[in-house]
Amino acid sequence: MHEERIDARRIVFGPLDEGLRAVAPVGPIALLGTPRSLAAVPTDALAGQVVHRWDGVRLHNPRATVREAGALIDAQGCASIVAIGSSSAMDLGKAASDGRSATLILIPTALGGAEMTRGYGFLEGDEKGGGRLRTPAPVVIYDAALLISLPRRELGSIGINAWAHTIEAAYARTEHATGGAAAIAAGSRLPPLLRAAARIRDATLNDALFRAAHLAGYALDTRSMGLHHAVCHVIGGLTQIPHGIVNAVVLPHAVRANARLAPEAVEAVADAFEIADLAAEAEAIARAFDLPRSFAALGAPPSLIERAVPRVLASPLLRNNPAEVDEPTVRAVLTAAYGQ
């Protein structure tokens, strides 16, 4: 009976306490997040269940963090894993649940869309590793109120990340009809929503942002990524700069590179989104949130470019780019993103 109820409502929009009661996770429960995100979970929503709170989520999650969370789950015999937070928490929930029989419930507090993908990442030294869930897709609960307290810079940067998912999914080589439709729907909605969110914050806008990010995450999962995220994943591993900030810096340069390599593909996406210049729009959104515009401004060393070039060229994501990517293109994107 319990499993049938969860399967019937895998995606829930609404207040967090109501959502948790609707999916009714079975205990013992491993509740994963940061101290800030764990504080957002209403205690009475999990009343009657044994809950083991673990606040060790870290930026990009080193492999040791995944092992530590998994050890807690195994030691306590957890039947459910509930992860709440930004993309790092979503990735940790997936990584810790992979291969285990526990039901996974993800509660995003930002717009990354990771909750809608089976893929997950973690750090192996200074490189991004990862995997793809072998277990059933997670249950997801979206509560628009969770975006209200999100710092402005984080909202904007991770919103750009969500929009980057739609751009790459829309011109990816991987075919998926509904994923492509989701990419176009979210890709056209996110820019005006983000521009509005740079000025105001309200429940209706937050709900619309979450619904667009939900579609962007689905598009990402079904059609995957290309040059832009190949660069972002490498830079994240080398610098541990937050993923959203890396996206905000790299996106306009990656789009312009693809506009040179695959002009028809980029033009088709721009037409579908009804946005004349995708790169200029990415820059405008970043300005609206006062986001950093270069890795140099973030204190990254000039050696970053040389360290990153071979790693980006080795990324399997480049095979999904709309056109073949060569070393001069990668170097040009990294040089432009590094800035002065």
Image (cartoon, helix red, strand yellow):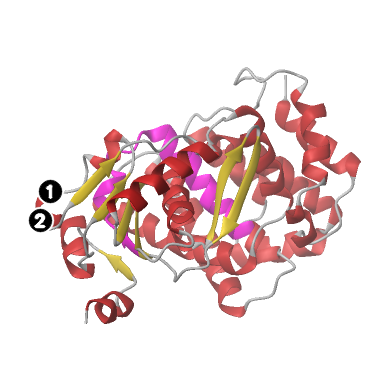
Tell me the amino acid under the disc marked 1.
Thr
Report the residue at 52% width, 34% height from top.
242
Report the residue at 63% width, 46% height from top.
129
Q: Position of residue 36 (x, y in %)?
A: 28, 35
Q: Quadrant of the C terminus?
A: top right
Up/down of 213 relative to 249, above or below: below
* Extreme residue in the front direction: 75
Q: Position of residue 46 (x, y in %)?
A: 15, 56
Mark 2 → mark 1, Cα distance in angstroms: 7 Å
Tell me the amino acid under the disc marked 2.
Ala
Q: Position of residue 306 (x, y in %)?
A: 82, 28
Q: Which mark is residue 43?
A: 1
Q: Quadrant of residue 35?
A: top left
Q: Is residue 147 left or right of residue 135?
A: left
Report the residue at 22% width, 43% height from top.
40
Disc 1 crowd, CA 10 A, few/some/many (<14, 14-19, 20+): few
